[in-house]
Amino acid sequence: MNATCPECEAALTLTDVLRGEIITCPECGAELEVTALDPIQLELAPMEQEDWGE
């Protein structure tokens, strides 16, 4: 499957990905979440926030 990085617009070739999976763009290093499979859509993954023990 082919997709485009929403951060740097690099062309990505993906195999065996699942909806909700986090991948890393090999060009810019952005963490991307697979939000749809047909057609494949990628969005920037949400940043994990520190909970500081709360």
Image (spheres, helix red, strand yellow):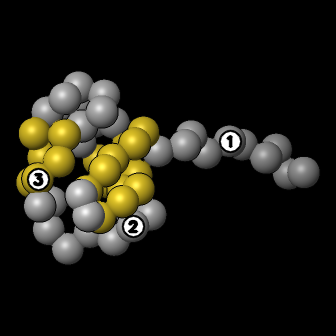
Left/right placement of residue 45 relative to residue 36 reads right
In the image, what residue type sits under mark 3?
Asn
Q: Residue furthest front?
A: 38
Q: Residue at x 19, y 29 (%)?
A: 9
Q: Position of residue 43 (x, y in %)?
A: 40, 42
Element type where label 2 sits in the image: loop
Q: Is residue 27 above or below residue 25?
A: above
- Which residue matches tag 3? 2
Kindly indicate the quadrant of the structure image that contains residue 20: bottom left
Q: Nearer the viewer, mark 1 or mark 3?
A: 3
Q: Position of residue 19 (x, y in %)?
A: 39, 67
In the image, what residue type sits under mark 2?
Arg
- Distance from the alpha carbon under mark 1 to that under mark 3: 30 Å
Q: Can residue 26 be seen by looking at this rendering?
A: no
Can you say which quadrant of the picture contains the N terminus? bottom left
Element type where label 1 sits in the image: loop
Element type where label 3 sits in the image: strand
- Distance from the alpha carbon under mark 3 to that under mark 2: 15 Å
Q: Position of residue 14 (x, y in %)?
A: 15, 60
Q: Specify which label sits upstream in the sequence, 3 or 2.
A: 3
Q: Residue at x 31, y 28 (%)?
A: 7
Q: Is residue 34 above or below residue 45?
A: below
Q: Specify which label sits upstream in the sequence, 1 or 3.
A: 3
Q: Residue furthest top?
A: 8
Left/right placement of residue 34 relative to residue 39 reads right
Q: Residues within 10 Å of mark 3 (few under 14, many from 20)?
A: few
Q: Residue at x 56, y 40 (%)?
A: 47
As rendered, which of 24 and 5 lies closer to the eye?
5
Q: Residues within 10 Å of mark 2 (few under 14, many from 20)?
A: few
Kindly indicate the quadrant of the structure image that contains residue 50: top right
**What label sits on residue 49 in the rendered view?**
1
- Which residue matches tag 2? 19
